[in-house]
Image (spheres, helix red, strand yellow):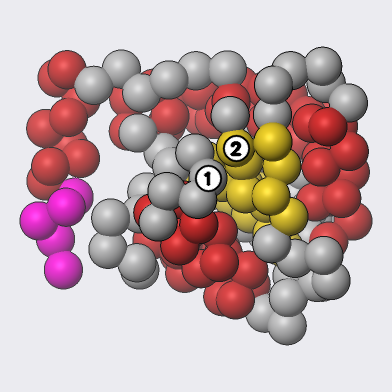
Amino acid sequence: MKIALASDKAGFELKNYIKSYLENEGKDYEIVDLSEEPAADFVDSSTAVAHAVLDGKTDRGIMFDEYGTGSAMASNKIHGMVTANVTEENTAHMTTQHNGAKSIAIGAGIVGKKRAESIVDEYLGVNYAGGRHQIRLDMLEKLY
């Protein structure tokens, strides 16, 4: 699985920590780091992740900033993107399984390293269920 990562200055340390964690996890992850240097703003880093996912360059994305909310809001402005601001494991799992989250946003000022590991594991360890849940995604796609 190809995963895009990016962050602004506030999320940069946690992004690098999770990058290292995923590379050493022993799973078949290919990490695409879209911010080798911190982005000037979370809008830049989050939209870079959104475009990488929507353009098919990566399968999923994880974005980092101070609180996660800004990155989620910015990326969700891009038509077709579904990003959830996640602070705990159940939301990471359910938003992916039931809402087809294409990326998650993690706030480095909210979530510590070990919790971020668990969140990322839950997010990457589940697939979108489709079925009855597709109705919601179809409804979201019609919004402008």
Specify the quadrant of the image occupied by residue 13.
Answer: bottom right
58 on left or right of 102: right
Image height of 53 relative to 95, above or below: below
* Position in image of residue 94 (x %, y %): 43, 24
Labelled disc at residue 2:
2
Marks 1/2 in contact by CB < 8 Å: the verdict is: yes
- The residue closer to the viewer here, 53 or 66, is 53
Q: Which mark is residue 68?
A: none
Label 1 sits on what residue type? Thr
Mark 1, residue position: 58
Could one spot residue 69 in this view of the protein?
no
Q: Between marks 1 and 2, how big is the CA–CA gap?
A: 5 Å
Q: Is residue 69 left or right of residue 55?
A: right
Examine the residues drawn in magenta and state their main secondary structure. Answer: helix
Q: Position of residue 28 (x, y in %)?
A: 69, 21
Q: What amino acid is at disc 2?
A: Lys
Which residue: 36% across, 23% down?
A: 128
| Range covered by the magenta-colored residues | 140-144
